[in-house]
Image: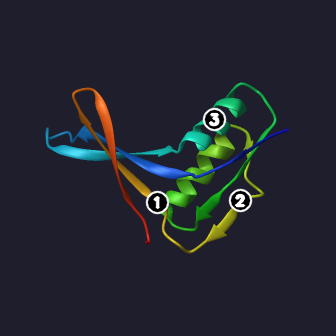
């Protein structure tokens, strides 16, 4: 089994509403989280050690792991909010603004 340890968060990527207004679209993410997802999709036996919130975004992260066959039984659950990473693109370069409890 491959054990992935790191942060799971929600990337808020720029997008547009159906009305053409600027918006942010939530996507499950985090570098190590994405590695675990890729391993699971490739059929590797993978598990993720991370903190997962009991909030709606934490449930989305857990569902994404399960859908990719990644074991999340070692994840620590809490009532703290999921970290959100708002992504802006300028000149092809991404910059991030993080929102969390701290």
Image coordinates of residue 65 in percent, x first then y, are 65, 45
At 73% from the left edge and 39% from the top edge, which residue is drawn? 69
Give the residue furthest to the bottom. 79
In the depicted view, which residue is nearer to us: 46 or 100? Answer: 100
Q: Which residue is mark 3?
A: 35
Q: Quadrant of the N terminus?
A: top right
Image coordinates of residue 81 in percent, x first then y, are 48, 68
Give the residue furthest to the right. 1
Residue 74 vertical position relative to residue 12 in the rendered view, above or below = below
At 43% from the left edge and 72% from the top edge, which residue is drawn? 102
Judge left or right: residue 77 versus residue 88.
Answer: right
The answer to which image quadrant residue 3 occupies is top right
Q: Of the residues under marks 3 and 2, which one precedes in the sequence?
A: 3
In the depicted view, which residue is nearer to us: 56 or 5? Answer: 5
Q: Which residue is mark 2?
A: 75
Q: Secondary structure at mark 2?
A: loop
Q: Which mark is residue 101?
A: none
Q: CA distance from mark 3 to mark 1?
A: 18 Å
Q: Estimate how packed mark 3 is, as few (under 14), some (14 to 19) or many (20 or more) residues with alpha carbons within 10 Å.
A: some
Q: Secondary structure at mark 1?
A: loop
């Amino acid at each position: 089994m491959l054990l992935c340890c790191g942060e799971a968060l929600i990337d808020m990527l720029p997008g547009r509403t159906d009305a053409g207004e600027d918006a942010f679209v939530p996507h499950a993410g985090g570098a190590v989280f994405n590695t675990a997802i890729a391993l699971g999709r490739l059929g590797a036996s993978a598990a993720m050690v991370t903190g997962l919130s009991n909030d709606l975004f934490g449930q989305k992260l857990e569902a994404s792991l399960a859908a990719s066959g990644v074991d999340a039984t070692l994840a620590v659950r809490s009532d703290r909010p999921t970290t959100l990473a708002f992504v802006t693109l300028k000149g092809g370069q991404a910059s991030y603004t993080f929102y969390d409890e701290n």
